[in-house]
Image (spheres, coloured by chain):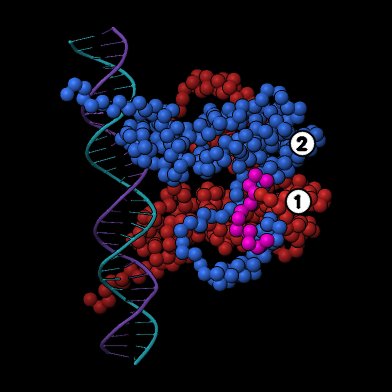
Chain colours: A red, B blue, C cyan, D purple
Amino acid sequence: MAQQAEPPRRTPLSRERVLRAAVALADEAGIGAVSMRRLAQHLGVVPMALYKHVADKDELLDGMVDLVLGEIDPPLPASDVNWQSAVRKRLLSARRAVLRHPWARQAIESRTRRTPAVLGYMDSLAGMFHAGGFTADLTHHVMHALGNRIWGFSPELFDEPRDDDAPGPTPEAQEAVAREFAERYPHILEIALAATAGDPAGVGRGCDEQFEYEFALDVLLDGFERLRREGWSSRREPSR
Amino acid sequence: MAQQAEPPRRTPLSRERVLRAAVALADEAGIGAVSMRRLAQHLGVVPMALYKHVADKDELLDGMVDLVLGEIDPPLPASDVNWQSAVRKRLLSARRAVLRHPWARQAIESRTRRTPAVLGYMDSLAGMFHAGGFTADLTHHVMHALGNRIWGFSPELFDEPRDDDAPGPTPEAQEAVAREFAERYPHILEIALAATAGDPAGVGRGCDEQFEYEFALDVLLDGFERLRREGWSSRREPSR
DNA sequence: ACATCTGGTGTACGCCGTACACCTGCCTTC
DNA sequence: GAAGGCAGGTGTACGGCGTACACCAGATGT
């Protein structure tokens, strides 16, 4: 036995490799499939090995979010004539990054730790408002007002709640359900119909999220610009 | 042995009782403490007994959210002179209900099923826009724009991530951390200082969430009113 | 009187995160 | 080149989770 049949020689783990594998796993099997055990299996390693690279599962998730945030385009230096288009581009870039990873929205929402990546992104955004002539005070409040839109998403109010499996109801049962819905929730039906130009068959198809996102974003950005021009200040009482 | 020592005679379970107990448990111990097993224990019953009243844990969570939604004041019939104050009151009532149950925000965010309670609330809100002169089209988009504010909250961007336990760093270590923070995230520091009227000691204290909520809400409502007056229409291409 | 139904029980399975002790092979230091 | 330390992968084990499934007791309808 000259050489003992090529000992496997796995490339060693690293925090980087663990996080990338976790992202890949989440991309293809959903965030629910990301367990320490399953991730370890994908890496050809025993579960506890991961703990040499991430403190616990929370840190794993934080790291995954950081990786997604890393995909956001850095702000182009002073290339824009006005703050609105600069902020808009940045947020839409964040949105693209998040949409690339369907699990990212939920992961971001569930995280509470602010990693350097998170802080860095928020800081650069605040800097863009500052450069656009916003006071720190107003910047603070407009960032709150943007809310989750800062991360490139806003809640999908009307989305279909995933309806896989299930045997499927009979047509007449569906009809009855639809009739009851129309009676009980007339206004929802009305706006749903408006969204499909009056075609009832299209109602289930969900919304154009990109449009909704930009609509809300623009309402907010327009409002912000108006406030800035008016020299808005929160002028809050020091008490409370 | 006349009577056998008062057989406990528990009041029987019911969906109502299960859900109320779950809400109570979440109120006092956090949503993380709500497991089927622990909830059963609180009710003096074996875990599987719960499944006679709720299909699974998801349905339990949905039911808990419904209970919170039930606390929202019903809309006062036509008492308001304009749609803005009517919607505003409703949303602030929703906010009060959600704030009464600290876990509700996260629970609502994580739910995907739209129960009748959820649909009913959304429908009545859409109806208020309709009554205020909004087209169905515009109503649809403004509800998207409101996003989670519909439920009485918006993301708490800057909140402290719960910092219990921990031995507490030395003052000079804190100082060093603060200095590095100021260097790396100057804009965040700036807006944080603005929020405390320049007092660095108050920076950790978090934001006035009520103020932030109403600020964003008003920016959005003002923008909505402007669009309505302009006769805005999405005029979307039928394709896509 | 008996059958049926409603609701609580007991056991068991497979998953999860992770504490802790252990081992192994490389790097440093003499 | 031997000794020691240490970074990183291993194995076992524990307690918790959701819930499938078989069972059973008492109330109810006939």
Q: Chain of mark 2?
A: B
**Residue A91 in the image, given as x and y percentages of width and height:** 66, 53
Residues under labels 2 and 1: Cα distance?
25 Å
Residue B106 on the magenta segment:
no
Residue A235 - label: 1
Nearest to the observer: residue B47 or residue A40: B47
Nearest to the observer: residue B6 or residue A210: B6
Image: magenta residue range? B199-211
Q: Secondary structure at mark 2?
A: helix
A173 sits left or right of A71 in the view: left
Q: Say if A203 sits above or below A116 in the image.
A: above
The residue under the point 51% across, 35% down is B65
Q: Say if B115 sits above or below A71 in the image.
A: above
Q: Chain of mark 1?
A: A
**Residue B119 in the image, given as x and y percentages of width and height:** 57, 29
The residue under the point 31% across, 71% down is A7
Label 2 sits on residue: B225
**Residue A210 visible in the current orientation:** no
**Residue A160 in the image, given as x and y percentages of width and height:** 54, 36
**Quadrant of the image containing the N terminus of chain A:** bottom left
**Residue D28 in the image, given as x and y percentages of width and height:** 31, 14
Q: Amino acid at mark 1?
A: Arg
Nearest to the observer: residue A221 or residue A134: A134
